[in-house]
Image: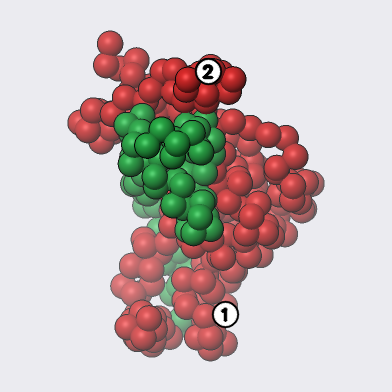
Amino acid sequence: MAQVEAADAQLLDALRAGDERAFAALVREYHSSLVRVARIYVSTLASAEEVAQETWVGVLNGLDRFEGRSSLRTWIFRILTNIAKTRAQRDGRTLPFSALQDPGRVPEAAVDADRFLDPEHPRWPGHWAIKPEAWPEDALLAAETRERIAEAIEALPASQRAVITLRDVEGWDGAEVCNALGLTETNQRVLLHRARSKVRGALESYLQEDET
Amino acid sequence: MTQDLEQLSCRELVELVTDYLEGALSDEERARFEAHIGLCGGCRVYLEQMRQTIEQLGHLPEDALSPDAERELLEAFRGWRSA
Protein backbone atom coordinates (compact mmCIF):
# COMPACT_ATOMS: atom_id res chain seq x y z
CA MET A 1 0.00 0.00 0.00
CA ALA A 2 2.75 2.43 0.96
CA GLN A 3 4.47 1.52 -2.29
CA VAL A 4 1.37 2.38 -4.29
CA GLU A 5 1.15 5.73 -2.56
CA ALA A 6 4.80 6.42 -3.28
CA ALA A 7 4.19 5.68 -6.96
CA ASP A 8 1.20 8.04 -6.90
CA ALA A 9 3.28 10.76 -5.26
CA GLN A 10 5.98 10.42 -7.87
CA LEU A 11 3.44 10.54 -10.68
CA LEU A 12 1.73 13.57 -9.15
CA ASP A 13 5.02 15.43 -8.95
CA ALA A 14 5.69 14.66 -12.61
CA LEU A 15 2.19 15.76 -13.68
CA ARG A 16 2.36 18.97 -11.67
CA ALA A 17 5.74 19.69 -13.19
CA GLY A 18 4.08 19.45 -16.59
CA ASP A 19 5.66 16.15 -17.68
CA GLU A 20 3.73 15.31 -20.82
CA ARG A 21 4.96 11.73 -20.96
CA ALA A 22 3.64 11.08 -17.47
CA PHE A 23 0.23 12.38 -18.52
CA ALA A 24 0.25 10.33 -21.74
CA ALA A 25 1.08 7.20 -19.74
CA LEU A 26 -1.70 7.93 -17.27
CA VAL A 27 -4.19 8.41 -20.08
CA ARG A 28 -3.13 5.19 -21.76
CA GLU A 29 -3.44 3.30 -18.51
CA TYR A 30 -6.92 4.49 -17.59
CA HIS A 31 -8.74 5.80 -20.62
CA SER A 32 -10.37 2.60 -21.83
CA SER A 33 -11.41 1.78 -18.26
CA LEU A 34 -12.93 5.23 -17.93
CA VAL A 35 -14.95 4.70 -21.10
CA ARG A 36 -16.09 1.28 -19.94
CA VAL A 37 -17.19 2.57 -16.55
CA ALA A 38 -18.85 5.65 -18.07
CA ARG A 39 -20.80 3.32 -20.35
CA ILE A 40 -22.59 2.02 -17.26
CA TYR A 41 -24.19 5.40 -16.73
CA VAL A 42 -24.73 6.85 -20.20
CA SER A 43 -26.58 5.33 -23.10
CA THR A 44 -24.11 5.47 -25.95
CA LEU A 45 -20.44 4.75 -26.50
CA ALA A 46 -20.02 8.26 -27.94
CA SER A 47 -21.36 9.79 -24.71
CA ALA A 48 -19.09 7.54 -22.68
CA GLU A 49 -16.10 8.74 -24.72
CA GLU A 50 -17.09 12.34 -24.04
CA VAL A 51 -17.46 11.65 -20.34
CA ALA A 52 -13.97 10.14 -20.30
CA GLN A 53 -12.56 13.18 -22.12
CA GLU A 54 -14.29 15.51 -19.67
CA THR A 55 -12.88 13.46 -16.82
CA TRP A 56 -9.34 14.17 -17.97
CA VAL A 57 -10.10 17.87 -18.05
CA GLY A 58 -11.49 17.50 -14.52
CA VAL A 59 -8.34 15.68 -13.46
CA LEU A 60 -6.13 18.48 -14.80
CA ASN A 61 -8.27 21.15 -13.16
CA GLY A 62 -8.18 19.38 -9.82
CA LEU A 63 -4.57 18.25 -9.87
CA ASP A 64 -3.18 21.12 -7.82
CA ARG A 65 -5.87 20.70 -5.18
CA PHE A 66 -5.63 16.88 -4.95
CA GLU A 67 -4.33 16.06 -1.50
CA GLY A 68 -3.75 12.36 -1.89
CA ARG A 69 -6.22 11.29 0.79
CA SER A 70 -7.45 8.63 -1.61
CA SER A 71 -5.37 6.94 -4.28
CA LEU A 72 -5.01 8.72 -7.59
CA ARG A 73 -7.00 5.94 -9.22
CA THR A 74 -9.92 6.27 -6.79
CA TRP A 75 -9.89 10.02 -7.25
CA ILE A 76 -9.95 9.79 -11.06
CA PHE A 77 -12.88 7.36 -11.01
CA ARG A 78 -14.76 9.56 -8.54
CA ILE A 79 -14.45 12.46 -10.97
CA LEU A 80 -15.64 10.16 -13.75
CA THR A 81 -18.71 8.86 -11.92
CA ASN A 82 -19.73 12.39 -10.92
CA ILE A 83 -19.52 13.60 -14.50
CA ALA A 84 -21.25 10.48 -15.84
CA LYS A 85 -24.13 10.73 -13.34
CA THR A 86 -24.68 14.41 -14.09
CA ARG A 87 -24.70 13.66 -17.77
CA ALA A 88 -27.11 10.74 -17.40
CA GLN A 89 -29.49 12.97 -15.49
CA ARG A 90 -29.22 15.69 -18.10
CA ASP A 91 -29.96 13.16 -20.85
CA GLY A 92 -33.02 12.08 -18.90
CA ARG A 93 -31.60 8.63 -18.42
CA THR A 94 -32.54 7.41 -14.99
CA LEU A 95 -29.95 5.31 -13.28
CA PRO A 96 -30.89 1.69 -13.56
CA PHE A 97 -29.73 0.83 -10.06
CA SER A 98 -32.13 2.66 -7.79
CA ALA A 99 -35.01 0.45 -8.84
CA LEU A 100 -32.97 -2.63 -8.12
CA GLN A 101 -32.30 -2.26 -4.45
CA ASP A 102 -34.12 -5.53 -3.98
CA PRO A 103 -32.90 -7.85 -6.70
CA GLY A 104 -33.92 -10.86 -4.65
CA ARG A 105 -37.61 -10.30 -5.18
CA VAL A 106 -37.69 -12.03 -8.53
CA PRO A 107 -35.81 -15.29 -8.25
CA GLU A 108 -33.48 -16.21 -11.06
CA ALA A 109 -31.83 -19.60 -11.29
CA ALA A 110 -28.09 -19.72 -11.94
CA VAL A 111 -28.61 -22.86 -14.03
CA ASP A 112 -31.75 -23.96 -15.89
CA ALA A 113 -33.96 -26.18 -13.74
CA ASP A 114 -34.04 -28.86 -16.43
CA ARG A 115 -30.35 -29.51 -15.92
CA PHE A 116 -31.24 -31.04 -12.55
CA LEU A 117 -33.20 -34.06 -11.40
CA ASP A 118 -36.48 -33.38 -9.69
CA PRO A 119 -36.21 -32.11 -6.07
CA GLU A 120 -38.50 -35.06 -5.22
CA HIS A 121 -36.31 -37.59 -6.99
CA PRO A 122 -36.21 -40.67 -4.71
CA ARG A 123 -32.47 -41.23 -4.89
CA TRP A 124 -30.74 -38.07 -6.14
CA PRO A 125 -33.04 -35.12 -5.47
CA GLY A 126 -31.82 -31.92 -7.11
CA HIS A 127 -28.67 -33.52 -8.51
CA TRP A 128 -27.29 -32.95 -11.97
CA ALA A 129 -29.30 -34.62 -14.71
CA ILE A 130 -26.85 -33.24 -17.28
CA LYS A 131 -23.50 -32.55 -15.63
CA PRO A 132 -21.27 -29.74 -16.82
CA GLU A 133 -18.30 -30.97 -18.85
CA ALA A 134 -14.83 -29.50 -18.37
CA TRP A 135 -14.07 -26.89 -21.03
CA PRO A 136 -11.26 -27.40 -23.54
CA GLU A 137 -8.50 -24.99 -22.46
CA ASP A 138 -7.48 -23.86 -25.97
CA ALA A 139 -11.06 -22.95 -26.92
CA LEU A 140 -11.54 -21.15 -23.60
CA LEU A 141 -8.53 -18.94 -24.25
CA ALA A 142 -9.37 -18.16 -27.90
CA ALA A 143 -10.03 -14.56 -28.94
CA GLU A 144 -13.48 -15.49 -30.20
CA THR A 145 -14.44 -16.74 -26.75
CA ARG A 146 -13.71 -13.27 -25.36
CA GLU A 147 -16.09 -11.83 -27.96
CA ARG A 148 -18.78 -14.19 -26.72
CA ILE A 149 -18.12 -13.03 -23.17
CA ALA A 150 -18.43 -9.40 -24.25
CA GLU A 151 -21.74 -10.21 -25.96
CA ALA A 152 -23.01 -12.03 -22.89
CA ILE A 153 -22.23 -8.97 -20.76
CA GLU A 154 -24.04 -6.70 -23.24
CA ALA A 155 -27.12 -8.91 -22.99
CA LEU A 156 -27.37 -8.58 -19.19
CA PRO A 157 -29.85 -6.29 -17.42
CA ALA A 158 -28.22 -2.92 -16.68
CA SER A 159 -27.67 -3.46 -12.96
CA GLN A 160 -26.05 -6.87 -13.45
CA ARG A 161 -23.93 -5.50 -16.28
CA ALA A 162 -22.79 -2.64 -14.07
CA VAL A 163 -21.74 -4.89 -11.22
CA ILE A 164 -19.92 -7.50 -13.30
CA THR A 165 -18.17 -4.80 -15.34
CA LEU A 166 -16.80 -3.12 -12.25
CA ARG A 167 -16.04 -6.24 -10.23
CA ASP A 168 -14.75 -8.74 -12.76
CA VAL A 169 -13.83 -6.79 -15.88
CA GLU A 170 -12.30 -3.79 -14.09
CA GLY A 171 -11.28 -5.62 -10.93
CA TRP A 172 -12.81 -3.26 -8.34
CA ASP A 173 -13.43 -4.67 -4.88
CA GLY A 174 -16.91 -5.18 -3.50
CA ALA A 175 -16.87 -2.10 -1.28
CA GLU A 176 -15.85 0.17 -4.17
CA VAL A 177 -18.68 -1.19 -6.30
CA CYS A 178 -21.29 -0.77 -3.54
CA ASN A 179 -20.09 2.77 -3.10
CA ALA A 180 -20.14 3.70 -6.79
CA LEU A 181 -23.53 2.14 -7.49
CA GLY A 182 -25.24 2.78 -4.16
CA LEU A 183 -25.85 -0.91 -3.50
CA THR A 184 -25.84 -2.88 -0.28
CA GLU A 185 -23.23 -5.60 -0.02
CA THR A 186 -25.87 -8.33 -0.23
CA ASN A 187 -27.52 -6.90 -3.33
CA GLN A 188 -24.19 -6.37 -4.97
CA ARG A 189 -23.45 -10.06 -4.42
CA VAL A 190 -26.83 -11.17 -5.75
CA LEU A 191 -26.36 -9.10 -8.92
CA LEU A 192 -22.81 -10.37 -9.33
CA HIS A 193 -23.98 -13.96 -8.89
CA ARG A 194 -26.67 -13.65 -11.52
CA ALA A 195 -24.35 -11.92 -13.94
CA ARG A 196 -21.52 -14.45 -13.52
CA SER A 197 -23.93 -17.36 -13.76
CA LYS A 198 -25.32 -16.09 -17.05
CA VAL A 199 -21.90 -15.45 -18.53
CA ARG A 200 -20.85 -18.96 -17.51
CA GLY A 201 -24.01 -20.31 -19.13
CA ALA A 202 -23.29 -18.42 -22.35
CA LEU A 203 -19.72 -19.74 -22.35
CA GLU A 204 -20.96 -23.27 -21.80
CA SER A 205 -23.39 -23.07 -24.73
CA TYR A 206 -20.70 -21.61 -26.94
CA LEU A 207 -17.88 -23.98 -25.98
CA GLN A 208 -20.06 -27.06 -26.21
CA GLU A 209 -21.49 -26.19 -29.58
CA ASP A 210 -17.89 -25.60 -30.67
CA GLU A 211 -16.87 -29.07 -29.64
CA THR A 212 -19.39 -30.95 -31.74
CA MET B 1 -21.06 -40.09 2.46
CA THR B 2 -24.48 -39.95 0.86
CA GLN B 3 -25.67 -38.09 3.91
CA ASP B 4 -23.36 -35.18 3.13
CA LEU B 5 -24.62 -35.09 -0.43
CA GLU B 6 -28.20 -35.11 0.77
CA GLN B 7 -27.59 -32.06 2.88
CA LEU B 8 -26.95 -29.84 -0.13
CA SER B 9 -28.20 -30.64 -3.60
CA CYS B 10 -26.33 -29.64 -6.76
CA ARG B 11 -29.19 -27.33 -7.59
CA GLU B 12 -28.72 -25.56 -4.27
CA LEU B 13 -24.96 -25.54 -4.52
CA VAL B 14 -24.82 -23.60 -7.80
CA GLU B 15 -26.68 -20.76 -6.07
CA LEU B 16 -24.02 -20.54 -3.36
CA VAL B 17 -20.96 -20.38 -5.60
CA THR B 18 -20.59 -16.59 -5.55
CA ASP B 19 -21.12 -16.39 -1.79
CA TYR B 20 -18.51 -19.13 -1.45
CA LEU B 21 -15.98 -17.36 -3.67
CA GLU B 22 -16.68 -14.05 -1.92
CA GLY B 23 -16.14 -15.60 1.49
CA ALA B 24 -19.71 -14.74 2.48
CA LEU B 25 -20.77 -18.19 3.71
CA SER B 26 -20.91 -19.04 7.40
CA ASP B 27 -18.41 -21.64 8.61
CA GLU B 28 -21.14 -24.26 8.64
CA GLU B 29 -22.36 -23.42 5.13
CA ARG B 30 -18.82 -23.44 3.84
CA ALA B 31 -18.19 -26.85 5.36
CA ARG B 32 -21.32 -28.21 3.68
CA PHE B 33 -20.33 -26.62 0.39
CA GLU B 34 -16.85 -28.12 0.51
CA ALA B 35 -18.13 -31.52 1.62
CA HIS B 36 -20.42 -31.58 -1.42
CA ILE B 37 -17.67 -30.42 -3.78
CA GLY B 38 -15.41 -33.15 -2.43
CA LEU B 39 -17.91 -35.81 -3.42
CA CYS B 40 -19.52 -34.44 -6.57
CA GLY B 41 -17.57 -34.30 -9.84
CA GLY B 42 -20.27 -32.30 -11.63
CA CYS B 43 -20.19 -29.53 -9.05
CA ARG B 44 -16.39 -29.51 -9.05
CA VAL B 45 -16.46 -28.85 -12.79
CA TYR B 46 -19.13 -26.20 -12.25
CA LEU B 47 -17.08 -24.37 -9.63
CA GLU B 48 -14.01 -24.53 -11.85
CA GLN B 49 -16.03 -23.09 -14.75
CA MET B 50 -17.15 -20.18 -12.58
CA ARG B 51 -13.53 -19.52 -11.67
CA GLN B 52 -12.53 -19.72 -15.35
CA THR B 53 -15.36 -17.37 -16.28
CA ILE B 54 -14.20 -14.79 -13.72
CA GLU B 55 -10.60 -15.17 -14.91
CA GLN B 56 -11.59 -14.58 -18.54
CA LEU B 57 -13.77 -11.60 -17.60
CA GLY B 58 -10.61 -9.97 -16.30
CA HIS B 59 -8.89 -10.38 -19.66
CA LEU B 60 -11.30 -8.75 -22.06
CA PRO B 61 -9.61 -6.71 -24.77
CA GLU B 62 -9.49 -2.96 -24.17
CA ASP B 63 -10.47 -0.42 -26.76
CA ALA B 64 -7.34 1.43 -27.71
CA LEU B 65 -7.38 5.19 -27.36
CA SER B 66 -7.72 6.70 -30.83
CA PRO B 67 -4.76 8.81 -31.98
CA ASP B 68 -7.13 11.79 -32.38
CA ALA B 69 -8.38 11.49 -28.84
CA GLU B 70 -4.86 11.16 -27.51
CA ARG B 71 -3.74 14.23 -29.43
CA GLU B 72 -6.66 16.23 -28.05
CA LEU B 73 -5.87 15.17 -24.51
CA LEU B 74 -2.22 16.05 -24.84
CA GLU B 75 -3.20 19.44 -26.23
CA ALA B 76 -5.45 19.93 -23.21
CA PHE B 77 -2.50 19.03 -21.01
CA ARG B 78 -0.25 21.58 -22.71
CA GLY B 79 -2.98 24.19 -22.37
CA TRP B 80 -3.32 23.38 -18.68
CA ARG B 81 0.44 23.54 -18.13
CA SER B 82 0.79 26.93 -19.73
CA ALA B 83 -2.27 28.35 -17.96
From the top left corner, tell me how far across and down residue B55 is, in percent: 34, 46
Residue position for label 2: A122
In the picture, which quadrant includes the N terminus of chain A?
bottom left
Which chain is mark 2 on?
A: A
Chain of the residue under label 1 = A
Residue A52 appears left or right of A2: right
- Give me the residue at 53% from left, 18% from top: A122
Spot the residue most to the top: A212
Image disc number at residue A62: 1
Question: Residue A6: x and y, percent?
Answer: 35, 86
**SS category of the residue bearing label 2:** loop
- Badge 2, how many Cα within 10 Å: few under 14, some, many 20+? few
For badge 1, the amino acid type reads: Gly
Amino acid on which disc 2 is placed: Pro
Q: Quadrant of the C terminus of chain A?
A: top left
What is the quadrant of residue A55 in the picture?
bottom right
Judge the density around disc 1: few (<14), some (14-19), many (≥20) Cα neighbours within 10 Å: some
As rendered, which of A105 and B37 lies closer to the eye? B37
Q: Chain coloured green: which letter?
A: B
| Label 2 or label 1, whichever comes before in sequence order | 1
Q: Residue A157: where, in percent of width, then height?
A: 63, 36
Q: How is the image coloured?
A: by chain
In the depicted view, which residue is nearer to us: B64 or A163? A163
* Picture disc at residue B9: none
Same-subunit check for callouts 2 and 1? yes
The furthest residue to the left: A138
Colour displayed for chain A in the image of the structure: red
The answer to whether residue A171 is above or below residue A154 is: below
Which one is in front in this view, the residue at disc 2 or the one at disc 1?
A: 2
Cα gap from disc 2 to disc 1, whole angstroms: 66 Å
Give me the residue at 49% from left, 33% from top. B6
Disc 1 is placed on an element classified as: helix
